[in-house]
Amino acid sequence: MTSLSPGSADALLFDLGRVVLDIDFSKAIACWAGHAGCQPESLLARYVRDEAYRLHEVGKISDADYFASLRASLGIGISDAQFLEGWNAIFAGEMPDIAELLPRAAKQMPLYAFSNTNRPHVDYFSKEYADLLGHFRELYLSSSIGLRKPDADAFDHVVAAIGVPAGRIVFFDDLEENIEGARARGLTAVHVTSPRDVGNALKALGI
């Protein structure tokens, strides 16, 4: 755990997936397999987060183009609407305790979110989890800013937008590569491997 102490931060920056919102990608695979009439295992074996996935996350290709790439890579002939249904099925609720932790933290310092995501997911979670996401002053989303973690320019963009020195921002993320990317740009980073990690870090900060 990074050393945190009361008064050591001026802003908190949260990844969304598996930090704030629970994600279960098997729900997408199951939905698509149901529409295609095949076994989920066969789709899972073929699914990769490829260049089209990355381009979709920075808003460089359309949803239709991304779903077309999935149609080809997965070898299934389902419609865009069916792909979208599965794509948005991954949201499995809020992470444990986060609905209690965010408002408490927001009383003491500004909260921000920084997520690699895409337009359909943004449209979906902005409505579905509006109350929870309302605790953030700003959401920095890869599909809007055209930059994604763990790239250095993505972190630099967000730090500049927040307007607080990088070393005074505590960043929470579930992926090691994003933690390393954040630390390389001077942020204090907490690797979230269980829901307790967020609560423990906030406690260490005196929140």
Image (cartoon, rainbow, N blue to C red):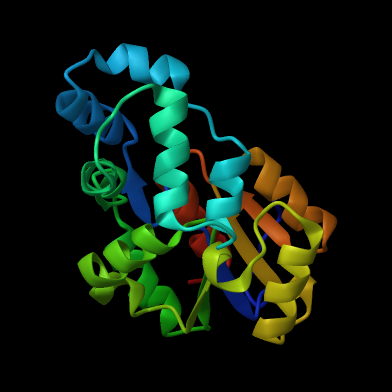
Q: Residue at x 67, y 63 (%)?
A: 147
Whole-percent x, y for residue 11 in the image: 60, 78
Say if 39 sits above or below 30 in the image. Answer: above
Whole-percent x, y for residue 189 in the image: 67, 56
Locate residue 53 relative to residue 195 in the image: left or right. Answer: right
Residue closer to the observer: 202 or 32: 32
Say if 114 sits above or below 54 in the image. Answer: below
Residue 69 seen from this side = yes
Q: Residue at x 45, y 19 (%)?
A: 46
> What number of labels is visible?
0
**Residue 172 sits in quarter:** bottom right
Residue closer to the observer: 92 or 81: 81
Residue closer to the observer: 83 or 136: 83
Locate residue 116 relative to residue 146 in the image: left or right. Answer: left
Residue 1 seen from this side = no
Whole-percent x, y for residue 47 in the image: 45, 25
Locate residue 139 relative to residue 186 in the image: left or right. Answer: left
Whole-percent x, y for residue 202 in the image: 50, 63
Q: Residue at x 28, y 63 (%)?
A: 124
